[in-house]
Image: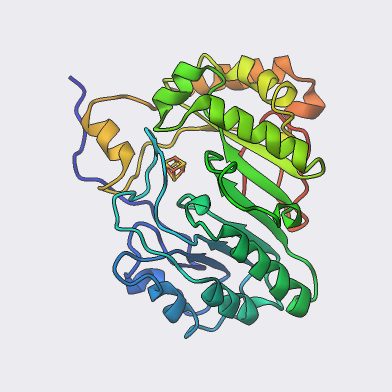
Amino acid sequence: MRKHNKRAEVAPVYDDQFGYWGDAKNEAYLHPQPKVLNIFPVEGDPEFLVREVLKRDLSKVEKIRFDPVNVCNIACIFCCTDLKAKHAQISPESLRSILHRISQTCHRISCGCGYEPLMAKNIDEYIQTIKKVVNDEFPLKPKVNMVTNGMLLGQRNLDSLEYLDWVHISVHSHRKENFERIEKGANFDTLVSNIKNLRKKYTDLNIHIEFVVNQENKEDVEEFTHWAFEELQADSINLKRVAVESYHPRSYLYESVIAESSLGLLDEEWHKISRKIAESWPSKLAEGQVFSSPDQIITKCAMTDFIEL
Ligand code: SF4
């Protein structure tokens, strides 16, 4: 039997960040003059981080990662976030107040970074808030994106999606049984139909697919890449090695660890996958990073080292 350390650990944060999903109220993570804001609702006191961030010096903020709600509708087996907290939501008005304070320096706005943004029924209001403050107050339009598992795309009023520079959708297999085993509670057919409808409705929207490679889907990678470009008409794909080192004690990854379910990849396995992808796509498509500069362009790329949200 594999041994594991039952005490869940949390990852360190970078010095210039404000707000940390692993320990929201810890002063140590509330930087006095941050460059990156991680703003999400806190259980029992949804606007805690909003109140605190508005007290800080925000003159150097380059990027905001904003979650309107602190819940998700599915349960990925490698999810390291606390998804057992009671529902909490930050108002669009609070988002407006923060954007107003960072308008002169911020060049990236990401919506839905730790949780599922479409769990906010009024998600379109947040996008419209971003659009309005940017139009009225930002000297330059920042890159704006949304990160979602895509399951609720068909159920929300999303009239403002064309304002996004890209939508970032997690899809962890093209095989229904693997997909539904990894993304528990999600229905594969619904997701595929949602993405295809999105493609039809917003022909110019950049659709980025995120695939987290782990023991359950490592054999799917090569076929998946072709399927996602050809069938889903994705603009870019990121194949990311699963991270299993740190997790919240109330996360699904912690449950996987407790259940002795080994999701992590050996270095050799990861290198083999990287080689296969490099061979299966022309080098100009298989190399290079997307979203790695302030200009943040999306290219049709089968593999990136990282996606900077
Ligand atoms: S990793 Fe999965 S379970 Fe976790 S927030 Fe994202 S979509 Fe939800």
Q: Residue at x 62, y 29 (%)?
A: 193
Q: Residue at x 61, y 81 (%)?
A: 101
Q: Is residue 224 above or below residue 256?
A: above
- Between 269 and 227, the one lying in front of the other is 227
| Side of 9 relative to 20 (left or right) | left
- Between 225 and 271, the one lying in front of the other is 225
| Side of 132 relative to 261 (left or right) | right
Q: Position of residue 53 (x, y in %)?
A: 48, 78
Q: Residue at x 74, y 29 (%)?
A: 233
Q: Is residue 11 above or below residue 132?
A: above
Q: Is residue 125 above or below residue 199?
A: below
Q: Position of residue 184 (x, y in %)?
A: 39, 31
Q: Quadrant of the N terminus?
A: top left
> Is there any visible trace of residue 256 in the rendered image?
yes
Q: Residue at x 47, y 79 (%)?
A: 32
Q: Count all numbered tags in the image, as a single digit.
A: 0
Q: How is the image coloured?
A: rainbow
Ligand 1 is found in which quarter of the picture?
Answer: top left
Q: Position of residue 77 (x, y in %)?
A: 37, 32
- Between 247 and 270, the one lying in front of the other is 247
Instruction: State which quadrant residue 137 falls in.
Output: bottom right
| Side of 96 relative to 115 (left or right) | right
| Side of 132 relative to 34 (left or right) | right
> Is there any visible trace of residue 289 in the rendered image?
no
Instruction: State which quadrant residue 272 falls in.
Output: top right
